[in-house]
Image (cartoon, grey):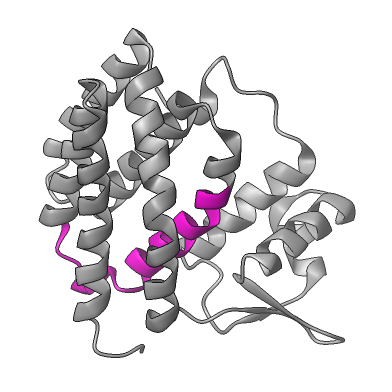
Amino acid sequence: MNAANSPESKPLSLAEQAYRLLEEKLVTLELPPGSLISEGQLIEMTGLGRTPVREAMQRLAQQELFKVLPRKGLLVTAVNRASLLHILEARKPLERVIVYRAALNARDEQRSSLAAIARGLTISHDSFEEFLRLDRELNELLDLCSGNPFVSAAAAPLRSHCRRFWYFYRQRMQLSDAISADSKLARLVARRDYNGSQKASDGVIAVMERFVASVDRLG
């Protein structure tokens, strides 16, 4: 079950809905890096009002997915290899906290869901879209299990940048290592192996670091 749709989740505010819609469009490159877009276009795109869209815009700008250009609009930021290395450096200790707490605190039904995600990953047959869906579902469930909204909130925008990098270079991506790393992490958390989970989390980051290093330069 997707953690975002669990019974424990609170109804999303309009601003949160706007944020999630726009974040998805940025991550999946529907809003391409380097493109210029207006506030009005974003309002039309989301079908939501000016106030929630503006709040979402400001949040995404703080996360460096948009750059505000006065009197011109919003510039979708470039996918930057050097920035990704800094992002991974910041993300690594946050993920260690999340998986440690998740392994300690997850309830039996959550552990069953983690095991199901691990199985789903192993039979995803190198499908990029399926991998990204399960990767996101895994992160959301780990956040829910960890019970620390502050560390989850800190990790969320870093994950967005990582997913956008996957999408940008998807034609050069070898999925097998990423699938294996995610699946191992989900299994270890499900087994309450908090020390092994932290090592597996480092392994997930290491896969991303190797992928970033394999990219010669941004296109």
User: In the image, which residues are magenta?
Assistant: 154-175
Residue sitting at x 77%, y 75% = 38
Tell whether 13 sits left or right of 143: right
Q: Is residue 123 visible?
A: no
Residue sitting at x 47%, y 64% = 161
Q: Is residue 209 above or below residue 143?
A: below
Return the x and y of residue 172 as percentages of the image width and height. Answer: 20, 74
Main SS, magenta residues: helix
Q: Nearer the viewer, residue 67 or 148?
A: 148
Tell whether 218 sits left or right of 26: left
Return the x and y of residue 125 as percentages of the image width and height. Answer: 12, 45
Tell whether 58 sits left or right of 190: right
Return the x and y of residue 173 as percentages of the image width and height. Answer: 20, 67
Q: Is residue 41 magenta?
A: no
Tell whether 144 sits left or right of 172: right
Q: Is residue 174 magenta?
A: yes
